[in-house]
Image (cartoon, rainbow, N blue to C red):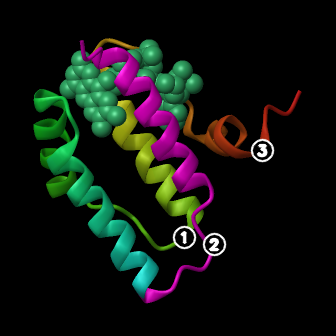
């Protein structure tokens, strides 16, 4: 059976990793494609309540596709809104590239 939490953590891993490797200087096409990607993703994400929620979030806060940094920070904020709704801890968005790209600096 479909496990909403397992699907969620794996989907976030994919989405944050994709944002982490998005270009620093995307072309016009890459920006348009990334914007389309999130809109289409939100229509087919196989958890209804999650998908509807994401569609609402995209209306208020469209994907910031100007650069890797912008996209990763935007997605971090989107994920934090879901964390808040679910009563989970807020993630410190300054650490997003360490978590999803560079590894922890210690
Ligand atoms: P997850 O929230 O899955 O996070 C995985 C890892 O990402 C964490 O361990 C942490 O290292 C890192 N992380 C956490 N926050 C951030 C952040 N802000 N930025 C970067 N990295 C971060 N579940 C519902 O019950 N209702 C919903 O409406 C819902 N909507 C969802 C919408 C989307 C688009 C997605 C992908 C998932 C949604 N989920 C929803 C699932 C939910 O967000 C979690 O994935 C699930 O509850 C499992 O949580 P988790 O504790 O494993 O950590």
Verify CB contact (< 8 Å) between mark 3 and mark 1. no
**Residue at x-position 50% and y-position 86%:** 27
Quadrant of res 53: top left
Tell me the element at label 2: loop
**Residue at x-position 72% and y-position 39%:** 98
The x, y position of residue 66, in whole percent, is: 47, 74
Tell me the element at label 3: helix
The residue indicated by pointer 2 is 24
**Residue at x-position 40% and y-position 42%:** 77
**Residue at x-position 56% and y-position 31%:** 92
Residue 96 versus residue 10 in the image, above or below: below
The magenta region covers: 1-28
Give the number of the disc on residue 67: 1
Verify CB contact (< 8 Å) between mark 2 and mark 1. yes
**Is the residue marked 2 within 8 Å of ligand 1, measured from its CB?**
no
Distance between the Cα atoms at labels 2 and 1? 5 Å
């Amino acid at each position: 059976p479909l496990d909403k939490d397992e699907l969620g953590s794996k989907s976030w891993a994919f989405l944050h990793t994709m944002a982490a490797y998005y270009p620093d200087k995307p072309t016009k096409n890459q920006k348009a494609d990334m914007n389309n990607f999130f809109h289409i993703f939100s229509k087919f994400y196989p958890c209804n309540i999650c998908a509807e929620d994401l569609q609402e979030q995209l209306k208020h806060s469209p994907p910031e596709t100007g650069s890797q940094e912008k996209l990763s920070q935007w997605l971090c904020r989107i994920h934090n809104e879901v964390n808040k709704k679910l009563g989970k801890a807020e993630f410190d968005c300054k650490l997003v590239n360490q978590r999803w790209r560079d590894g922890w600096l210690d």
